[in-house]
Image (cartoon, helix red, strand yellow):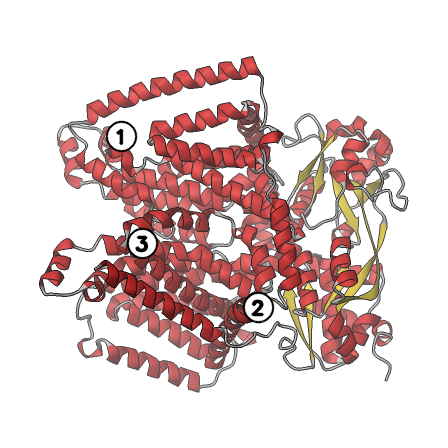
Amino acid sequence: MSATATTVSKPGTAAGETRARHSGGGLRDAVRRRRGLLTGGGALAALLVLGAVLLGGGTWPAGLTADISAPLDAANEWVVDNRDSHPLFLYFLLHLSNTATDAVDAVYQGLDALGWLGVAAAAVLVAWRAAGLGRRGLRVALTALGAFAVCGLLGMWDATLLTIALMVVSVAAAAVLGTLIGLAAGLSDRVDRALRPVLDTMQVMPAFAYLLPFVLVFGTGTPAALFCTVIYAAPPMARLTALGLRGADPAALEAAVSLGANGRQRLWTARLPLARRQMLLGLNQTIMLALSMVVIAALVGAGGLGEEVYSALATTDVGKAFAAGLPIVLIAVWLDRTTAAAGDAIGTSAPAGGWLHGGRAWALVAAAVAAAAAVRTAGWPEAWTYDISAPVNRAQEWITANLTFTEVWAREFTLWLLNPLRDALLWLPWWSVLLLVAAAARLVGNWLSAVTATAAMAAIGVLGVWTKSLNTLSQVLAALVVTLVLGFLAGVLCARAGRLERWVRPLLDAMQTMPQFVYLIPVVALFGATRTSAIVAAVVYALPAVVRITTQGLREVDPAAVEASRSLGASTRQQLFGVQLPLARPALQLAVNQGVVLVLAVVVVGGLVGGGALGYDVIKGLSRGEMGLGMTAGIAIVCLGLVLDRVTQRTSRTAR
Amino acid sequence: MRTARTLRTAVAVAGALGVLSLTACGAADTGKSSAAGGDKTVKLTVPSWVGAQANVAVAERILEEELGYQVKTQQMGEVLAWDALSKGDIDAILEDWGHPKEEEQYVETKKTVVKGGDLGVTGHIGWFVPKYFADEHPDVTDWKNLNKYAEEFRTAESGQKGELLEGSPDYVTHDDAIISNLKLNLKTKYAGSEAAQITAIKKYAKAEKPFLTYWWTPQWLNAEVDMVEVKLPEYKEGCDADPEKVACAYPNTPLQKFLNADFAKDGGEAAEFLKNFNWTTEQQNEVALMIAGEKMSPEAAAEKWVKENEATWKAWLPKK
């Protein structure tokens, strides 16, 4: 993945950068001010513990809760009773769902008609053209060729086509939706502020939670899966479009104005073209997020590679799940390299083959694909497949049989870290938790973030899931600590040794895009059906983003500053801790933020391997058809995300 | 300037509404009428557990080879499958372990689903310990002695109590109520998925460690890991009526088939065949073990079974 596969740009960063640039004279003051705040915080914490001892522990009082599951279940009921007769369904929603099914079917039929030769030719040539022809393009084209060949070899050709068909339609829809939202947010500050929490919610709310209502409204199979994917995948497109529009070079806009362009002309001729690179990055991330929904889509019968992965779980057949998961990784790598190369090619004029420029090259691509399709090959030939499940299963069994220390490690981790952390959180009276959250958020941010964080925490109590949420919170915190420690370490190593980074890159790609369902069984075999398993799954998923952002952040530290410190006789260690890490702070903050978002994204998956608490509730809501239960837990996860975001991210307003 | 912007917004909104109303000019198909896709198609749901996959694989094989139907299978959760069955997105559920709420809603009230008769397989849920542990401590198989062994079942997750391993949220369970009503020193631990539960059981069995788990028959894993049921207070009709007050064992459940009402009426030979479909627990386990134990594909396992058991399935074919 191009360094940023999941780095969703967040409000905190831009401000962080400006602050880093202007720090210098005011640094000492800032430190002094912080120390004061820290002392205050410490005193407050001591007071809280004292208060807790004096007043006794306690969970959220039952009198202060409001049950939202009853109305949600009633809504659920209403949908079931009215969806065949109510005009809202007959004249609108069912059209949406039928259109979605037809669109995906049409794309699939089209791909199928091309035959395997046609599809492979199309993928390779489009990759080659998009990457700007020539030798650069060749590398990307070879990646595409390899990816498709392996998909065929694994015997997953047909499932791969089905998945690609679903991806094409959902990515297209997500891109359109995202661009529209991004346009609105990029052109108006007020819309931007209003949309930010909406986009956050779209990403942190587990798809499992709203899968059920979507199934009830739109029907099982393609439509529900498609709309869920669009919701999850659209935010990066929106965020990066808005960022691109805002970041447009003022001089270019000035020039456009002076040439007498009106608002719309400025948008079309100056701002949008200038934002093209950002928008392509947004598209890249939208594709990656959409791919991560493939297995979830299978839970409601959307078919494709996800179904292969999911059905392999029933027989605990890791080999089969791996054989279906690998094509997902390969599709991701192919699309990532292609869109990333296309992004890099923007602005570099006149590629290698002079006469092959622009439209002519595309025409050639189309002609070649048509020729390949005309050969009329059917699906991938059966004889050219190889079943890797037996060797993979053997390898998995050998590993889990020989790594016996994992169980001991899991036990100690649970006894010495998880249990005390959870018990401490539960032991604290509810009001003191609220105070702690408020104090922490005020310490890092401003009064507004303190109020937001406290309100979110209180909402969890009001929803009646206080105990479960604190249990989940303890797991999230533990996973976050492990992720950040490992991620920063690996990031520093990668930044210092370029070759190492190239070596780990494919591994990080696989960790990010391989569906978690594939490695759930090995994880349980190693760590048992415990909370530790859930944490391991979360760490595996969140680690790559943290490593990448850290590496990139350290690399981008001004070489002059490092050079200066070296000439002053600083050791490697001193350079790292005295210069590089402090200067890379904005990147490190973004890494923390991504750690939070990604760890929360796998809370539900953790529920599948013994994580319990909110994650289990969400799955239970989906599989038992209890919308209230699933949605309540989903909202609580969003609230936890909000709290964690506010206590870890400095808002732009603190700079003032 | 401001009026211009308002005007533009208004035009945009009107345009959007226009597009919407265009799509909405006719009533959409509600799925029932259009979903058939040719009258020789049967749509079945594939549940996540292997026994039910065996039903579908065998039915699919016979429908396609003997009766000339095209079978479409779709994988989804149990409750979602009920909903899809009611809408006609799928035609039949071949193995249902009891969903009283859905039965009442769809079979009794809306009448969109009809009963398809017994599958022939009887399901039973209970608490199980591994045989190697029961052999050493024979009295563990009575619930009255469970507290004595609670310490043996303790894990880092269950704290001071013994752990009762639970499976997927899909499953029918009263275990939390049973534990508190029988005053047992146990704590449920929800693995969250069947795959996680099976993997955990296999892990315990390999190390020959004691464990206590919610489990059921028929299940292919029973052929690999020998387990013994712990006797709970005997099941009596209605003792599980109030979920809060359950203090008895689980009943034996003759597994049921359910058909979409329209399909049952107009489904012709396919519907008749699916109503006739009826086999024994042993027969289902034979196919299930081929799929899960020998890692054969469901299609291959069904093909093998169908070849070897002609007498059994010939009786399911519609009378001509």
Amino acid tagged 2? Pro
Question: Given this view, does label 3 or label 2 mark the residue nearer the observer?
Answer: 2
**How far across and down, in percent of the image, does residue B18 sit?**
41, 72
Question: Given this view, does label 1 or label 2 mark the residue nearer the observer?
Answer: 2
Badge 1: residue crowd in 10 Å (few <14, some 14–19, many ≥20) = few
Position of residue A447 relative to residue A201, above or below, is: above
Chain under disc 1: A
Amino acid tagged 1? Phe
Q: Tell me which residue sits at (17%, 35%) in the image.
A: A22
Q: Residue furthest left?
A: A258
Label 3 element class? helix
Chain under disc 3: A
**How far across and down, in percent of the image, does residue B151 sit?**
73, 27
In whole angstroms, how far apart are the C-alphas of marks 3 and 1?
A: 38 Å
**Disc marking residue A577:** 1
Residue A85 position by quadrant: bottom right
Q: Name the residue under label 2.
A: A87
Q: Are marks 3 and 1 on the same chain?
A: yes
Q: Name the residue under label 3.
A: A185
Amino acid tagged 3? Ala
Chain under disc 2: A
